[in-house]
Image (spheres, rainbow, N blue to C red):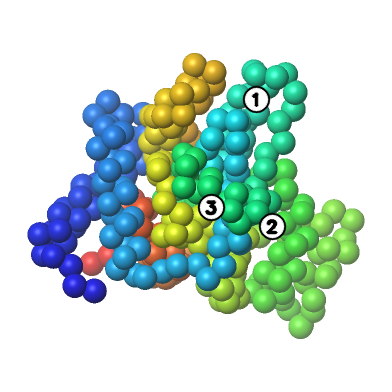
Amino acid sequence: MVVHSKKFSQIIHQKTQLVSEHYKYMHSPTKLESYDVIKTQKARQQILDFTCDDNKWNSSNHYEQYRNIFVDDQYKFMYCAVRKVSSITWSSIVRQLHNNKSGQRFFKRLLSTYKPLEIKHRLSSYVKFMFVREPMERIFSAWYDKFVNGFQKDEYEHLLGPRIVGKIRPCPHHRNCAKEILSSRHPNMNITFTEFSRYLLEIVTDIEKEDMHWNPYYYHCDPCFIKYDFIGHYETIKPDADEILRKLRIDHLVKFPEGNSSSVPLMRQHYAELGPDVTETLAHLYSLDYQMFGYSINQTLQLLGMSKP
């Protein structure tokens, strides 16, 4: 693809600034005094558009992505729910919004449940938004939630544990360790972060079709086809969310809670066990997400204390 040199230079400059901003707020999540929502949003959109044009990526089956997009016909917005990026908080916001109005429980509807012409109308006229997070932080958060300290821990251990333990964990005398653990009185596979990372690298054959808690943003939300009006980031979630609520004219009805939780200190400990080479290989599974949303694999390695020579 031939790109005008001036435009290319401008995009590179914007991306450099955007990457620096995103990682600055990961280091200091409460220091947002200088954050300009509108200016940053414009840069995020331009970098996303440039990357989509440059990579020519597009989903062959948009219906899969429509199943991840929640629709609110009353307030005319659509939200691509990315797990481990405050999706539960956004669900709570929507419930509050409708309970404030009617006092009745609100049932979310997916874009995939509409007819083709209805989908087309909503894509062209509703406000559309999504949120992303530094990919390696999201992967770590997904492992911690599903295999260490989340309410679905038992479910995920039964679903994926045998596959991970059976293929990756050394088991003496050719025994079936996974089967033995599951058949015990108190089954607990204790899937480590290293084992989970090796699962993604060595067993998974198509990261796009993986679990919604760790499949890539570019596939999950299809931003090269669906033109989102706003792309929020976990690092700046409060001002970004406030801007969306203002844009939807519902900021007087609901409020997004203050702050977010940073897992960077704990991340460093567990990624150190992987080492820089494996961590970088894992990050490259999500290389298109890094390009599209203003993140940097090298900056992530530095954040984790793994600066490569």
Residue beneath the point at 31% across and 29% down: 31
Quadrant in the rendering for residue 305: bottom left
Residue to which mark 1 is pinned: 98
Left or right side of 29 for 46: left
**In the rendered image, the vertical position of residue 119 relative to residue 241, given as above or below:** below
Q: From the image, which quarter does the N terminus lie in?
A: bottom left
Residue to which mark 2 is pinned: 190
Quadrant in the rendering for residue 70: top right
Using the numbered discs, state the Cα–Cα distance from disc 2 to disc 3 in whole angstroms.
Answer: 46 Å
Residue 302 visible to an observer of this rendering: no
Residue 304 visible to an observer of this rendering: yes
Other-residue count near label 3 (Cα within 10 Å), few / some / many at <14 / 14–19 / ≥20:
few
Q: From the image, which quarter does the C terminus lie in?
A: bottom left
- In the rendered image, residue 37, in percent from the top left (x then y), is placed at 31, 33
- In the rendered image, residue 247, in percent from the top left (x then y), is placed at 41, 29
Residue beneath the point at 44% across and 64% down: 286
Nearer-the-camera pick, 274 or 138: 138
What amino acid type should be assigned to the residue bearing mark 2?
Asn
Other-residue count near label 2 (Cα within 10 Å), few / some / many at <14 / 14–19 / ≥20:
few
What amino acid type should be assigned to the residue bearing mark 1?
His
**In the rendered image, the vertical position of residue 37 relative to residue 295, given as above or below:** above
Residue to which mark 3 is pinned: 120
**In the rendered image, the vertical position of residue 36 relative to residue 109, given as above or below:** above
Using the numbered discs, state the Cα–Cα distance from disc 1 to disc 3 in whole angstroms.
Answer: 25 Å
What amino acid type should be assigned to the residue bearing mark 3?
Lys
The answer to whether the residue labelled 2 contacts the one labelled 3, judged by CB atoms less than 8 Å apart, is no
Nearer-the-camera pick, 131 or 2: 2
- Dot 1: what SS? helix
Q: Residue furthest left?
A: 6
Reading the chain from its start, which is encountered first: label 1 or label 2? 1
Reading the chain from its start, which is encountered first: label 1 or label 3? 1
